[in-house]
Image (cartoon, rainbow, N blue to C red):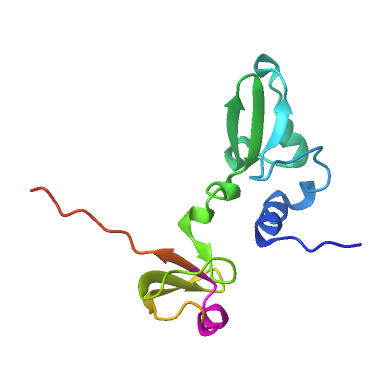
Amino acid sequence: MDTELTPRQQAIVNAYGAAWGKLPAVTRDGWAMICEFGPNVSLNWASYGFSEQQVQIKKEGRDVYWRPVGLVGIEDNNGWYRFDKDKPLKNQEVHAMQAGKHYVGKITVFDPKNDYYERTYSHWRPLEEMPLPIY
């Protein structure tokens, strides 16, 4: 039985490219373990076709992880929400995108239950209040 990947999972698969399926394990946020002990770090990503400039590294205790730099920000999707999953509040002004890559601009969501927004836009991000300059 095939299970369809979520957009987040698909982004991780795409970032790893040909290396996907060869890695022993990858976390929900796209991290692959290099080794269990920090002093024994090997350049494991090189064996999967990645250079040091193409990866992000993180250490947690004695464990060392890596992932493609294209996954930086995946934890919160760089602050963007999907219209098909999370709806803005009624009368909320948001930044909007189409097809996940074309910035449309600012829109006001008058009725988040109206499927027009989901059919027309892919992502939204709240407008944030910017503090006024001090001087």
Above or below 11: residue 135: above
Nearest the viewer among 20 and 97 is 97
Report which quarter residue 56 is drawn in. top right
- Inspect the magenta stretch and tell me whether residue 120 lies in it: yes
Above or below 31: residue 21: below
Above or below 21: residue 105: below
Residue for point 75% across, 60% down: 5
Q: Residue furthest left?
A: 135
Magenta extent: 114-123
Residue for point 38% across, 74% down: 105
Which percent across, then down, holds residue 111?
Answer: 44, 81
Give the quarter of the figure containing the N terminus.
bottom right
Q: Is residue 22 left or right of residue 38?
A: right
Q: Is residue 63 left or right of residue 130?
A: right
Report which quarter residue 119 is drawn in. bottom right
Above or below 87: residue 111: below
Q: Is residue 4 left or right of residue 126?
A: right
Which percent across, then down, holds residue 82?
Answer: 55, 66
Which percent across, then down, holds residue 50?
Answer: 69, 41
Report which quarter residue 85 is drawn in. bottom right
Residue for point 71% across, 24% down: 42
Which percent across, then down, holds residue 9?
Answer: 70, 55
- Inspect the magenta stretch and tell me whether residue 101 lies in it: no
Nearest the viewer among 40 and 81 is 81
